[in-house]
Image (cartoon, grey):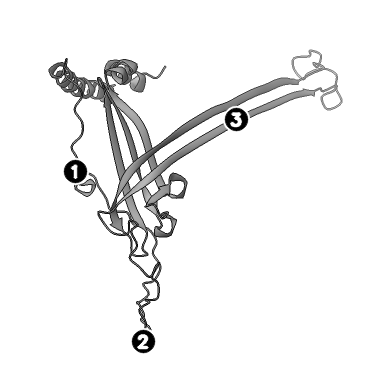
Amino acid sequence: MRRAMLATMAASMLGGCAAMDRIKNIGQQPPLSAVDNPTARPGYKPVQMPMPAAMPASYNPNSLWRNGSRAFFKDQRAHQIGDILTVKVNITDKANIANETQRSRTNNEDSGVENFFGKQKLPILGSALPTRLFTADSTSSSDGKGSVNRQEALQTNVAGVVTQVLPNGNLVIEGRQEIRVNFEIRELIVAGVVRPEDIESDNTIDSSKIAQARIAYGGRGQITDVQQPRYGQQVLDVILPF
């Protein structure tokens, strides 16, 4: 209970600070985030992936071609830190799952004694033996049903920046897009690891070819604020056991 009260007080203080910021921005459009270096943000961590052993580059005598090169001429596709490429976000997921489990069990236990060491009556008491000394009945049943019906579709393009080149040549990319319409900001964030070979000739890549993909689409502003429950209700939803 003490921890719950402390959590409630802390949430109230944080909610009060957030409320003050909202009151200060009444009548103002929600500000856009500053364009900054993704690697300089608090909490940023370089991606670490299993890497193969490094292979030294080899050159053939009297040859302009270097082993391991992707093209004879300069490749205009993104290949180093700071380069920009376009991510084609194309997500169309649909799932329809239905499960049902039924279980039933019935048990009966019935035992009787007709004589006690050859006698029809109980010793000392002199009363007749009961025909049944132990009787137990149990019945249990369960019926569980579950279903999932989900359908998602998201198609858009967003430009990303190469933030890291892994030792095996794969690229870590991150892209962020913000669009403000009146008093609502829509955000699209894309991040993950891509192979240079999967980047098409027009410097684009499909989202299905991004490993460890992180795609977020949401928003903030007046409409989102109205759709969210108040912070007090959110705290109660967490701490109340019923």
Q: Label 3 vs label 1: CA separation?
A: 41 Å
In front: mark 1 or mark 2? 2
The numbered dot on residue 96 is 3
In front: mark 3 or mark 1? 1
Q: Residue furthest left?
A: 24
On screen, residue 61 versus residue 83, left or right, reads right
Q: Earlier in the sequence, mark 2 or mark 3?
A: 2
Q: Could you tell me if the residues under marks 2 and 3 are in contact, i.e. CB atoms within 8 Å? A: no
Category of crowding for the residue at label 2, using alpha-carbon neighbours closer than 10 angstroms: few (below 14), some (14–19), many (at least 20): few
Q: Toward which corner of the image does residue 233 lie, by quadrant? A: top left
Task: Indicate the secondary structure of the residue bearing disc 3.
Answer: strand
In the image, 225 versus 134, the foreground residue is 225
Which quadrant of the figure contains the C terminus? top left
Residue type at mark 1? Asp
The numbered dot on residue 61 is 2
Q: Which residue is mark 1?
A: 36
Residue at horizontal 26 percent and vertical 26 percent from the top: 180
Up the image or down, 119 lies above or below 194; here it is: above
Task: Indicate the secondary structure of the residue bearing disc 1.
Answer: loop
Residue at horizontal 62 percent and vertical 24 percent from the top: 145
